[in-house]
Amino acid sequence: MTETEVRFEDHEIYRPDVAGWHRDRMPAIPDVFPLDLRPDWICEILSPSNERNDIVRKMLTYQRSGVSHYWLLDPIAAALVVYRFTEPGYLLVQSAQGEQRIRAEPFERVTLSARGLVEGNDPDDEE
């Protein structure tokens, strides 16, 4: 797995823990980094050393940049928080803890649990 750097502003280049792009926006994997094409979805995995950075600084940058979906995954608490972009700010749309299963935007076709994401289990595909 390679870490992908994304330029959000000239002075703000981040390496999201996990990021995704719609295929119509990124039909092929680029070979130039950092990427200037902002992700449609980002998931940051919290740790005691980066929690404030992910919850405050990165979240504000991703919001200013119009990243459609932002997830925060806390592996210690086995908790997932799902946000959706809105002009006034990110809107909390869902949260789950432990084994609780949800259909989290933008992946509504599968059910996920925070514990499953932390442990690397495959989601249940119900279609």
Image (cartoon, rainbow, N blue to C red):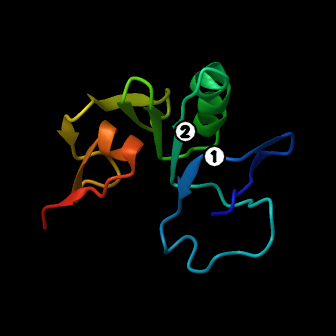
Q: What residue is disc 2 on?
A: 44
Q: Residue at x 33, y 47 (%)?
A: 105
Q: Are marks 2 and 1 in contact (CB under 8 Å)?
A: yes
What is the C-alpha distance between the residues marked 2 and 1? 6 Å
Residue 56 vertical placement versus 72 (above, below): above
Q: Residue at x 49, y 73 (%)?
A: 23
Q: Is residue 99 left or right of residue 36?
A: left
Q: Is residue 61 left or right of residue 66?
A: right
Q: Earlier in the sequence, mark 2 or mark 1?
A: 1
Relative to the observer, which residue lies in front, 78 or 14? 78
Residue 111, how many percent across, how many down? 21, 51
Q: Residue at x 55, y 39 (%)?
A: 44
Amino acid type, label 2: Glu
Residue that sits furthest to the bottom in the current view:
28
The crowd level at tag 1 (other Cα within 10 Å; few <14, some 14-19, many 20+) is some
Residue 29 vertical placement versus 36 (above, below): below
